[in-house]
Image: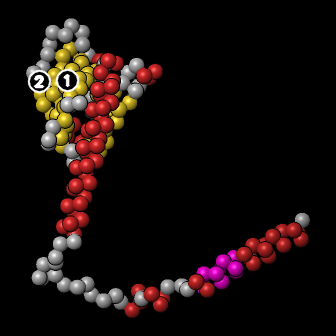
Amino acid sequence: MDSVPFHFEAFGGLGEVLGLARADQAGLVLQFSTRDALFGVLKSPTRNLCIGYEDLLSVRFRSGFLWMTPHIELRVRNLDVLGDLPESSEGRVCLSLRWRDRRDAQAFAADLDQLRAHRRILQLDRALDAMGAPRPSDWREPPPQPACLADSTLPTESAQTGYQSRKRHDRVDYDAENRLST
């Protein structure tokens, strides 16, 4: 599914946002306009908001109350991405859907989340490849570890078991003293 229509209330119920969400090569594109909810006469021009795949944190389809109010919940990594969209808070926006569009929206959300995850994996692979790249000629080895941080200064296993056995004996002695005093 390439696109899905959405709507949600804005400005405390005095406005309504109508739009279309579609997946693009660059990311998720939200085309929307705002109109007044009272008469529907005042309408803003159509605006486009592009959210890159690297900025998307999660895409979830929710069935809603009694499966009658489906919606797609978007979470982003950067608050500035949703700055132009009304009623977005804490890097999250909820796109309400019509009941008849629920199956298309569910497929759209699954495809979008899969694309997001695939792009993230490619980004991490590139970062790992960059880490394994040959070192520049001016790179130097780190200095040797100081003697005080050598492995020989760490407590040995026998020292740890001795501590545990002392702790066990102290507990037994404490319990014996309590029984004798009562």
The quadrant where residue 89 appears: top left
Tell me: residue 77, above or below residue 48.
Answer: below
Judging depth in this view, the residue of 51 and 111 nearest the camera is: 111
Report x, y in % for residue 86. Answer: 23, 28
Q: Quadrant of the N terminus?
A: top left
> Quick check: 55 above or below 144?
above
The local crowd at label 1, few if under 14, some if 14 to 19, many if 20 or more residues have their Cα within 10 Å, is many
Task: Describe residue 12's horizontal placement relative to residue 62 as left or right.
Answer: left
Residue at 30% in and 32% down = 107
Report if the CB atoms under discs 1 and 2 are less than 8 Å apart.
no
Residue type, label 2: Thr
Please tell me whether mark 2 sits on a helix, a strand or a loop.
loop
Q: Residue at x 25, y 58 (%)?
A: 124
Residue 168 belongs to magenta span: no
Q: Which residue is mark 1?
A: 19
SS of the residue at dot 1?
Answer: strand
